[in-house]
Amino acid sequence: MLTLYYAPGTASLCVHQFLIELGIEHRLEKVDTDAKQQKSPEYLKLNPAGVVPTLIVDGAPMVESSAMLMWLAEQDPQARFVPGEGSRGRRDYLQWFLLLANGLQPPFRAWFYPAEPAGEAAIDAVKANARVRIEAMWDRINAHLEQNGPYVCGAQLTAVDFFLFMLCRWSRNMPKPATEWPYLAMFIASMKARPSFKTLYAREGLTEWA
Ligand SMILES: N[C@@H](CCC(=O)N[C@@H](CS)C(=O)NCC(=O)O)C(=O)O
């Protein structure tokens, strides 16, 4: 059985929701990030970067939430959440997975851990820059959804939408959250309406942005 090391609301959230959505049996191991459990020698053996999530598959650890989503989508016998090979949707799927993981998740890391890139003295500049980069991506994704939505790959809901939805959630307390962009707001509302979202919130004990 799969085991997901998670912490509520963090990068594990999309994987947790997707496991629920797929109906794949799994075990949860909560990582106490307040107590820095993710930096313990035991956890670092699983995830050398000391971050959540980690997914244990056949006894071997897998890292990177976006890779987990892609892999899980492939495990679904009905292939419900991955566009068919050779389709326009497949190109969008690959492109946006990489773009979100390389271009949107990193500025969120800078926003939430602003001392990391250049120390305490640079916090304000790092956050200001992260905000600009995040909002530029919302502009770009909103335009894509307007043209090709309602989901990232058009009419088909795919694994990449769960990744995008989590990133949207992370912006909820920012000066201009993702809900300020109309097509992103519609996307968010439709993702929130999924039963897996309710189950996820109950399991992780989340209430904010319900
Ligand atoms: N690219 C990684 C990012 C993982 C990540 O940065 N996780 C954060 C929570 S969202 C974390 O574990 N932070 C605790 C820390 O860095 O000590 C992924 O998507 O799996």
Image (spheres, grey):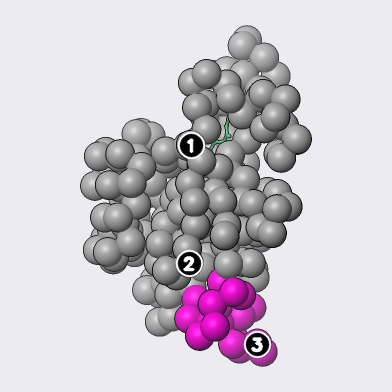
Which label belongs to residue 24?
2
- SS label for mark 3: loop
Specify start and end residues of the magenta stretch as a single range.
73-91
Q: Confirm or deny contact between disc 3 and disc 1 (CB under 8 A).
A: no
Q: Earlier in the sequence, mark 2 or mark 3?
A: 2
Q: Give the residue at x 38% y 46%.
A: 169
Name the spot of residue 99 as percent of width and height, x first.
63, 58
Amino acid type of the residue tagged 3 in the rendering: Glu
Q: Which residue is mark 3?
A: 85
Residue 80 seen anywhere in this rendered image of the structure: yes
- SS label for mark 2: loop
Name the spot of residue 128 as percent of width and height, x first.
52, 28
Q: Earlier in the sequence, mark 1 or mark 2?
A: 2
Ligand 1 located in image quadrant: top right
Query: Is disc 1 surrounded by few (<14), some (14 to 19) or many (20+) residues within 10 Å?
Result: some
- SS label for mark 1: strand
Judge whether 157 appears above or below 194 on screen.
Answer: below
Q: Confirm or deny contact between disc 2 and disc 3 (CB under 8 A).
A: no
Count of numbered labels shown in the rendering: 3
